[in-house]
Amino acid sequence: MGILKGKRVLITGLISNRSIAAGIAAAMHAEGAELAFSYVNERFRDRILDLAKEWNSTHIFPCDVQNDEEITSMFDALGKTWPEGFDILVHSIAYAPADQLNGDYLTCISREGFRVAHEVSAYSLAALAKTALPWMKDRQGSLLTLTYLGAERAIPNYNVMGLAKASLEANVRYLAVSLGQHGMRINAISAGPVKTLAAAGIAGFKEMLNEHKEHTPLKRNVTLEEIGHTAAFLCSSRASGITGQVVHVDAGYNITSGI
């Protein structure tokens, strides 16, 4: 029996079969979970529906996390699908304008870029958690988000996204306190670099992959499958004593001197 047998999971941020969200979906499905997905707008609807079918799901819901009404509407619709509530929320959403992710931090940074990166990448977690609470409380529910080492170190070209990820990690700690009184947990995975559509927007990403591979203790990069397995564990009852944590899944790169 899978460690998530009978659990209902909403995964946000799925964009392709090579995204971290896809790795998490595959692992959770393999562990027995029933899945639902959000998509940002109609342009992505058919793509997400095709991906969802790979994991025996047709539960997809539109949601632009910059719109509070859409967040509310998504959970209202999800409530009709799962009227008893659901157990796990995966937040795999991050974005900064492309001009913020290429070059010197101080040269790139703008007020609008800062606002967008933090609203989409960090505030959205709290917004989703707040609206999901009535559907998840008293079910020993679990939330999970995705971060990166750029929250802890100044990574070339990562720029304002590093600040947004640092905000996201603080968000996890404060949410852990708020959610704990309802029997809920929240954690973050700090994943090593993997080839995804999101990563392609970061200048010098290929060089980053090679640098990580050379300097990790395991002398390799991590896989989507490894990230997915960790996600499934953290959201299962086997991790019932873990909350408010950032778990590095990066082949040990974070313990080295690095960049």
Image: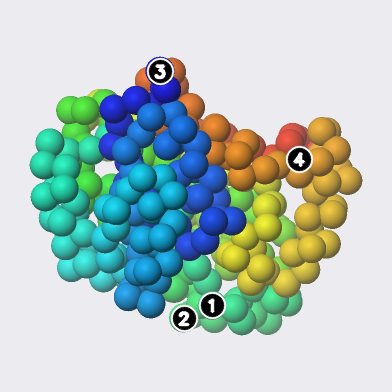
| Residue of label 1 | 97
| Residue of label 4 | 253
Rounded to the nearest whole Å, what is the CA distance between mark 4 and mark 3?
Answer: 33 Å
Disc 2 marks which amino acid? Glu
Residue 232, percent across and down?
Answer: 47, 32
Rounded to the nearest whole Å, what is the CA distance between mark 2 and mark 4?
Answer: 32 Å
Q: Eyeballing the image, is 60 above or below 240?
A: below
- SS for dot 1: loop
Residue at (34, 54) in percent of width and height: 37
Between residues 94 and 126, which one lies in front from this camera angle? Answer: 94
- Crowdedness near tag 4: few (<14), some (14–19) or many (≥20) residues, C-alpha within 10 Å: many
- SS for dot 3: loop
Rounded to the nearest whole Å, what is the CA distance between mark 1 and mark 2?
Answer: 9 Å
Q: Eyeballing the image, is 42 above or below 250?
A: below
Asked whether disc 1 touches disc 2, contact meaning CB atoms under 8 Å apart, the reply is yes
Disc 1 marks which amino acid? Pro
Which mark, by number, is residue 112?
2
Q: Indicate the colouring scheme.
A: rainbow
Instruction: Write down the quadrant of residue 109 in the picture.
Output: bottom right
Residue at (52, 61) in percent of width and height: 16
Disc 3 marks which amino acid? Met
- Crowdedness near tag 2: few (<14), some (14–19) or many (≥20) residues, C-alpha within 10 Å: few
Mark 2 or mark 3, whichever is nearer to me:
3
Mark 4 or mark 3, whichever is nearer to me:
3
